[in-house]
């Protein structure tokens, strides 16, 4: 059950909503919180109930450690120094993450390096483990710093399990959420928040099932097809994934924020038009904002941040982004992607230190193309797959040849009369690429406009609400007739 599925939209979400506010209406406030925790656990268990004890165990463990840290910030009243307790708590969380996410990767590399035959355990990655682990590590650190105090287990369980963010973020801070869960203002139905929530949810749904899933066809054909790509096909492949990833993950976050607003809860904004960025630092202030904030506050700054010598600052940047890349998955491709962004940030810092600048148009073009190139490594399964796409992107000799990206015309989401007419007088590969580049051109126009939150901040008049309703109806049609892929960030 994913946010874009009819089961979630037509059954789960209404039941969760009406059950919660019914209990609040009859003044069973604690029962209302327990209801939200219960439906959130059901939402998680719907994927694989075998991992529900893992989530519950993580919640109990971190609540106990966080409570101990909050109550004993000095070692005089506790058996163990708080720093030791914090270190053990973080180590336990990282060990859990390492076992489920990196054990196969580590054993595979040991086999390759030492030519041994250790058996791979083939561990299935629990859904959302990276997100709920990082969220709770932040809670432990904030508890140790005195920035978070939570002695109510039900409140803490709701903070961790609240279904809109549980599976793929945003990554939350305890201090920004618990005041909302504790506020009596959130207990009553707020029709303005319902309108805002449905507005942003509809935009996110459209992003996912109409735009992202359309680009997925060309991205998958190029990356997974195993064929050499010419210039046009390679660029169609890379740009398709660049836009697929953005609209997939930002669509998820829009739907998460919209669903949370139905319960009067504001989740943090995770995207702010990242492809409008004029430099790589600006990009990371706009892309996956809660992860960027997390890496800055809990990794980059503890390493020394920008308060060190220049070589050490460069080391801190590289270490932060290499580890950030590895967080996304157990693959050398993610390490390469993280290293590329680390190098880009070091270069940007050195460039700024020299007082150099460039025209905005050139800055945007350079930034966007670097991001597009780096996503090739992020998406590719192997280095050979990544280099195959990149070789095609620089294959100028094929510019005057016919694009040959092998996309089945049966899978074209935009089927309809346009593709039918194209296929009357163009080869299937060329027709597919024309459709793809048309979609890319339209998307470039879209990302240059106001994003969903800028539209939401401007008020919801009849025109906007009507537009959102139209997007919702179109998206629901696509949801009903397609097999629907899962969100990309469920893999991380």
Image (cartoon, rainbow, N blue to C red):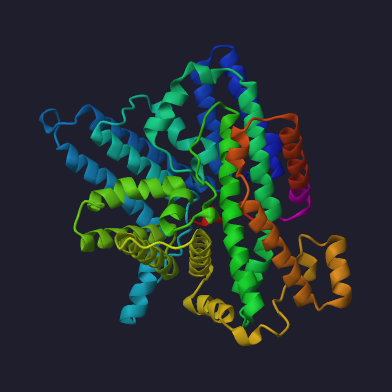
| Residue 276 position by quadrant | bottom right
Q: Residue furthest top?
A: 26
Task: State whether residue 337 is above or below residue 472.
Answer: below
Residue located at (63% from left, 67% from top): 219
x and y, in percent, of residue 296 in the image:
33, 49
- Relative to the observer, which residue lies in front, 303 or 458? 458
Residue located at (54% from left, 81% from top): 391
Task: State whether residue 255 is above or below residue 386.
Answer: above
Please state the total of marks drawn on the protein image: 0
* Magenta stretch, residue numbers: 477-483
- 277 on left or right of 64: right
x and y, in percent, of residue 10 in the image:
71, 36
Q: Residue furthest bottom?
A: 397
Task: Confirm whether residue 413 shows in the render.
Answer: yes
- Relative to the observer, which residue lies in front, 232 or 173? 232
x and y, in percent, of residue 140 in the image:
30, 38
- Relative to the observer, which residue lies in front, 369 or 482? 369
Instruction: Give the main secondary structure of the magenta stretch.
Output: helix
Task: State whether residue 165 is above or below residue 316.
Answer: above
- 376 on left or right of 19: left
- 342 on left or right of 369: left
Question: For residue 226: magenta?
Answer: no
Residue located at (63% from left, 48% from top): 449
Task: Confirm whether residue 487 shows in the render.
Answer: no
């Amino acid at each position: 059950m994913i946010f874009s599925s009819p089961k979630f939209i037509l059954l789960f979400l209404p039941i969760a909503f009406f059950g919660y506010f019914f209990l609040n209406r009859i003044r069973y406030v604690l029962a209302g919180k327990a209801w939200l925790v219960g439906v959130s656990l059901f939402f998680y268990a719907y994927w694989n109930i075998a991992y529900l004890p893992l989530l519950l165990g993580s919640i109990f463990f971190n609540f106990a450690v966080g409570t101990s840290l909050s109550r004993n910030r000095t070692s005089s009243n506790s058996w163990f120094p708080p720093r030791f307790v914090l270190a053990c708590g973080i180590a336990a969380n990282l060990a859990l993450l390492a076992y489920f996410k990196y054990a196969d990767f580590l054993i595979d590399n040991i086999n390759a390096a030492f030519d041994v035959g250790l058996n791979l355990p083939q561990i299935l990655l629990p859904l959302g483990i990276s997100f709920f682990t990082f969220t709770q590590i932040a809670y432990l650190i904030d508890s140790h710093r005195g920035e978070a105090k939570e002695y109510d287990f039900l409140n803490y369980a709701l903070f961790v399990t609240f279904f809109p963010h549980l599976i793929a973020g945003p990554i939350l801070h305890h201090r920004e959420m618990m005041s909302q869960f504790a506020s009596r203002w959130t207990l009553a139905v707020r029709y303005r928040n319902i309108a805002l929530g449905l507005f942003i949810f509809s935009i996110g749904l459209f992003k996912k099932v109409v735009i992202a899933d359309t680009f997925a066809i060309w991205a998958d054909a190029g990356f997974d097809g195993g064929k050499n790509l010419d210039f046009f096909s390679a660029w169609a492949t890379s740009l398709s994934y660049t836009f697929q990833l953005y609209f997939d993950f930002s669509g998820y976050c829009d739907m998460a924020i919209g669903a949370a607003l139905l319960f009067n809860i504001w989740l943090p904004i995770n995207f702010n038009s990242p492809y409008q960025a004029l430099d790589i630092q600006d990009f990371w202030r706009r892309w996956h904002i809660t992860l960027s904030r997390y890496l800055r506050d809990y990794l980059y700054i503890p390493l020394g941040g920008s308060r060190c010598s220049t070589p050490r600052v460069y080391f801190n940047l590289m270490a932060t982004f290499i580890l950030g890349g590895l967080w996304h998955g157990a693959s050398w491709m993610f390490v390469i992607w993280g290293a590329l962004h680390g190098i880009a940030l070091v270069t940007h810092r050195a460039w700024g230190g020299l007082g150099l600048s460039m025209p905005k148009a050139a800055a945007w073009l350079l930034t966007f193309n670097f991001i597009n190139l780096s996503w090739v490594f992020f998406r590719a399964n192997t280095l050979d797959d990544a280099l195959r796409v990149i070789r095609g992107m620089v294959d100028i000799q094929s510019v005057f040849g016919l694009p040959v990206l092998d996309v089945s015309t049966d899978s074209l989401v935009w089927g309809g009369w346009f593709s039918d007419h194209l296929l009357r007088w163009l080869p299937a590969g060329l027709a597919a690429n024309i459709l793809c580049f048309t979609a890319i051109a339209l998307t470039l126009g879209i990302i240059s406009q106001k994003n969903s939150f800028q539209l939401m901040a401007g008020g919801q008049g009849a025109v906007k609400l009507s537009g959102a309703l139209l997007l919702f109806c179109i998206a629901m049609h696509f949801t009903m007739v397609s097999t629907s892929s899962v969100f990309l960030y469920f893999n991380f």
